[in-house]
Amino acid sequence: MKAIAVLTSGGDAPGMNAGIRATVRTALTGGLSVFGVKRGYQGLIEDDLFSMTSTDVSNILQRGGTILHSARSEEFKTVEGRIKAAENLNKRNIDGLVVFGGDGSFRGANDLQREHGIRVVGVPATIDNDIWGSDFTIGFDTAVNTALEAIDKVRDTAAAHDRLFIVEVMGRHAGFIALEVGIGAGAEEILIPETVTKIPDICKKLQSRYEKGRTSSILVVAEGDEEGNAYEIARKIETHSGMKSRVTVLGHVQRGGSPTASDRMLATKLGYAAVKALLDDAAPCMVGVENGSISRHPLADAWTRRKELDKLLVQLSYGLE
Ligand code: ADP
């Protein structure tokens, strides 16, 4: 292997830059040339590649977002789109590709290797943490800390006005963010897609706490809870019990910001691990960190296996009354 490329795809995550930096510098140290691809697979199709040097990744470790930009590409889901992408890699003699993203991006990477023999390594980077094969994904820790900081502030105003607040965090299919944020913020209730939400039970628990002297409450809800988003939950609680609430949707704030120390370490380890996997001829695979050690798994594990929530955290989410 002489040349590799790196891209970031799907939803951006804080720490992607730290991962790009580690990938580029590990590759250069290993004697490889490195190309950056702008705007994920769409940039690969449109030939938006540039040769990268060590200084291209100076002073990015601490920055949120991704210097390579990210995008979604419908065209890459087609055979024709992937032919164009492979041509752009082949004409530069690039035979390895590092993809930072989620399971959708890994599916695309897998197709590229199967159809065109480009060796691909997936690096789990999504704030949702919903990828099997790595204890944590790049960006999750930062998103949790960002949401916690915001909820601590919401708590102040909730307490001052004796209010019920319903705070929605990201997580369309998984409650990893809501679970950790809810526990870290001391939320009275945590609503996630993996557990059954019963509105009457929640109302009963809230009311019983008020009877015992509690004057304000915070509910943390994952956007993908089966009872609906924060606005729908608020409406259902009011319909059932008459309790009024305020809704705060944290939204894309959770995607931004400087990565935490944990995310910088994780991204640096995984960027390094991705290049090592290419040099060891272990592609196609995804790299992860499990129990403190670097691991490699087939890319397909990312979409065929479901990562479970930490059982103790789920138990704790039912409330420390
Ligand atoms: P994530 O990687 O965060 O899960 P997406 O699911 O949006 O994000 O996927 C990112 C990109 O990966 C898509 O825009 C598309 O180009 C590519 N991709 C997703 N799913 C597939 C698939 N089944 N086959 C080929 N490419 C895919």
Image (cartoon, helix red, strand yellow):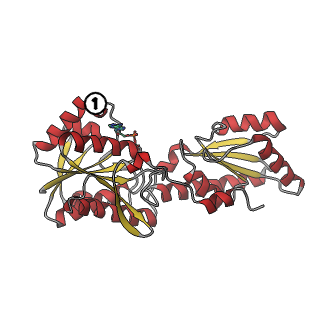
Does 250 sit above or below residue 274? above
Q: Residue at x 47, y 49 (%)?
A: 255
Q: Is residue 185 visible to the viewer in this orientation of the structure?
A: no
- How crowded pointer 1 is (Cα within 10 Å; few <14, some 14-19, many 20+) is rated as few
The image quadrant that residue 137 belongs to is bottom left
Q: Nearer the viewer, residue 237 or 198?
A: 198
Look at label 1 and name its amino acid. Thr
Element class at badge 1: loop
Farthest right residue in view: 211
| Pointer 1 residue Cβ closer than 8 Å to ligand 1 | no
Q: Quadrant of ligand 1?
A: top left
* Picture mark count: 1
Which of the image's four quarters has the N terminus? bottom left
**Residue 57 found in image quarter:** bottom left
Say which residue appears at 61% left-offset and 54% top-offset.
179
- In the rendering, at what x and y percent does residue 31 appear? 13, 64
Q: Residue furthest bottom?
A: 292
Q: Is residue 277 visible?
A: yes
Q: Position of residue 91 (x, y in %)?
A: 10, 42
Provide the residue designation for mark 1: 78
Location of the C terminus (image quadrant): bottom right
Q: x%, y% of residue 122?
A: 32, 52
- Please name whichever residue, 43 or 98, is drawn nearer the observer in this view of the structure: 98
Relative to 307, is 269 on the left or the right? left
Image point (83%, 56%), residue name: 214
Give the image location of residue 171, x and y in percent. 54, 45
Asked whether, in this view, residue 139 is left or right of residue 92, the answer is right
